[in-house]
Amino acid sequence: MTGMVCRVKLLAACFGVLMAWPLWAAPPAVMEKHDSSQPVHITSKRLQADGVLNRVRFIGEVEARQGDVVIYAPEMVLYFQEQTRDIEKVEAFPGVRVVQGGRVATGNKGVYFAAESKIVLTGSAHVRRGEDSLEGDEIVIFLNGERSIVTSKEGARVKAVFHPKGDRP
């Protein structure tokens, strides 16, 4: 009977940690909503613009910064809406790193969707905040919310590491 009680307590503790700790979200006092109306600052070694296709390609050590979000990649393509010329989406590859506050996310490819203020990382996707981490084949990060979605290919598993922050014996 005591083995059963220990298993129930362990399961309850694990569930509590998972429910109380959103990896991508900072504490409410620190986390601000991502403001996609702010200007986007981009630096790179080269730029190729195509007005017919409504896109701009940045090549070589690309750094894109908007508010508190910074995206680093070897290459980045911005797609614009034809009518408004607003950024519709941004693709970053091969190998992307996204930094927002104390959170760092990486993947083989990243796509930022401006309308939804979300980033989709694919291919060995990984999110780290302090010692805690999540891994999967795809991670969807909602910049304006305290949530993310991690999925893996069929037959593969999502991996998570959480370090309790409470008092330790």
Image (cartoon, rainbow, N blue to C red):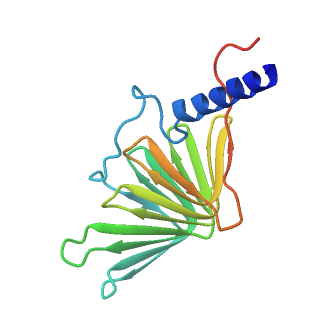
Q: Residue at x 41, y 48 (%)?
A: 143
Q: In this orientation, which residue lies closer to the viewer: 27 or 67?
A: 27
Work out whether 1 lies above or below 64. above
Q: Position of residue 7 (x, y in %)?
A: 74, 28
Q: Residue at x 51, y 53 (%)?
A: 149
Name the quadrant of the C terminus: top right
Name the quadrant of the N terminus: top right
Q: Position of residue 53 (x, y in %)?
A: 34, 86
Q: Is residue 115 left or right of residue 92?
A: left
Work out whether 50 lies above or below 139. below
Work out whether 83 lies above or below 21. below
Q: Is residue 25 left or right of residue 169?
A: left
**How many discs appear?**
0
Q: Residue at x 39, y 25 (%)?
A: 29
Outermost residue, front side: 1
Q: Position of residue 68 (x, y in %)?
A: 42, 43
Q: Residue at x 73, y 22 (%)?
A: 5
Q: In this orientation, which residue lies closer to the viewer: 49 or 144?
A: 144
Q: In this orientation, which residue lies closer to the viewer: 27 or 41?
A: 27
Work out whether 28 lies above or below 95. above
Q: Is residue 27 left or right of residue 103?
A: left
Outermost residue, bottom side: 52
Q: Position of residue 93 (x, y in %)?
A: 57, 70
